[in-house]
Amino acid sequence: MSSRLLRPARADRRTTAPRSAAPLGTRLPLVAVAVVAAGLTAACGPSSQPVGSAAPAKAGQSSEAALPSASESATASPEASPSASASPSASASASPSRAATASATPSRTPSKPARTSTAPEPARVPGPGYDSSADAQKQIEAALRAAKADGRAVLLDFGANWCGNCKAADKVFAQSQTTAILGASYHLVKVDIGGNSSANSALLRKYSPSGGTYTMPVLVVVSPSGTVRTDTHVTGNPSLTADGINAFLRKWAS
């Protein structure tokens, strides 16, 4: 009986022994994982973050590292932009300065009145002889006003109608060349001193104050301001010919 009972027991052991092997096989990987985890903990040190949070942390670190580069590039571009914007400002400031320069040429150079090519009208040349009824004072004053306006000189011709030299001078004055010189450069006033006009005699002494005996005609050249330039009572008369009188007139013309 005992032998029969033992045999099945052995047989049961043989058959049941493999059943316990499976649990042992499943336990071995767990043990290995625990050993590996313990080794990692000992090598890396304890982690304050749970497992699986390392990847997000690395991603966060990489994004934070990228942000400064982006901000640096963003800040770098404004710093570089002044140099780029300098050209527009320079060009913008250059164009007003040129416009200002273009608009300043007219103010620095005042416009001058346009010169007319038309020659001024020649002054009127009186005919031969002396008008004893004329107001010589008013004629001289009018001639001086005209001289101030056009710059011509005033020629005073003191003479008498009975004077031979005065008639010779009148003939030269009537010649075209002499008339042109007189009309271009002089206002001629003829004053009669051959009569009894005390007023005309006073005018002679005013413009030829040296006195004495006068040899007619007495030719006195007066500037527009009223200053006597020459007096033939002092210098002597020129030759009463066309050449002599024309040379005299050209010499003292203004």
Image: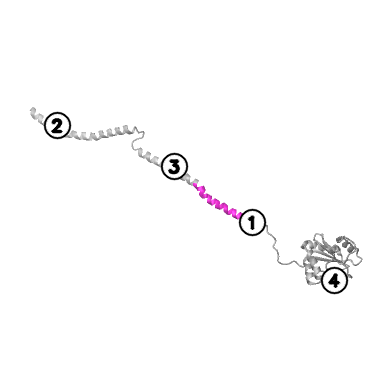
Residue 59 image point, x, y percent: 38, 41
Discs 4, 2 touching: Cβ within 8 Å:
no
Mark nearest the camera among 4 and 2 is 4
Query: How many other residues sit within 10 Å of disc 1, few (<14), some (14-19) or many (≥20)?
Result: few
Discs 3, 1 touching: Cβ within 8 Å:
no
In the rendered structure, which amino acid carries the disc numbered 1? Thr
Of residues 24 and 140, the one nearer the viewer is 140
Circle nearer the N terminus (2, 3)? 2
Of residues 141 and 228, the one nearer the viewer is 228
The disc at residue 105 is 1
Taking the image as shown, residue 142 lies to the left or right of residue 34, namely: right
Inter-mark Cα distance, 4 to 2: 184 Å
SS at mark 3 in the image: helix
Of residues 168 and 71, the one nearer the viewer is 168
Query: How many other residues sit within 10 Å of disc 2, few (<14), some (14-19) or many (≥20)?
Result: few
Mark nearest the camera among 2 and 1 is 1
Residue 42 image point, x, y percent: 31, 32
SS at mark 2 in the image: helix
Of residues 187 and 33, the one nearer the viewer is 187
Discs 1, 4 touching: Cβ within 8 Å:
no
The disc at residue 13 is 2
The disc at residue 168 is 4
Residue 205 image point, x, y percent: 88, 61
- Residue 135 location, quadrant: bottom right
Circle nearer the N terminus (2, 1)? 2
Residue 7, above or below 55: above
Discs 2, 1 touching: Cβ within 8 Å:
no
- Residue 152 location, quadrant: bottom right
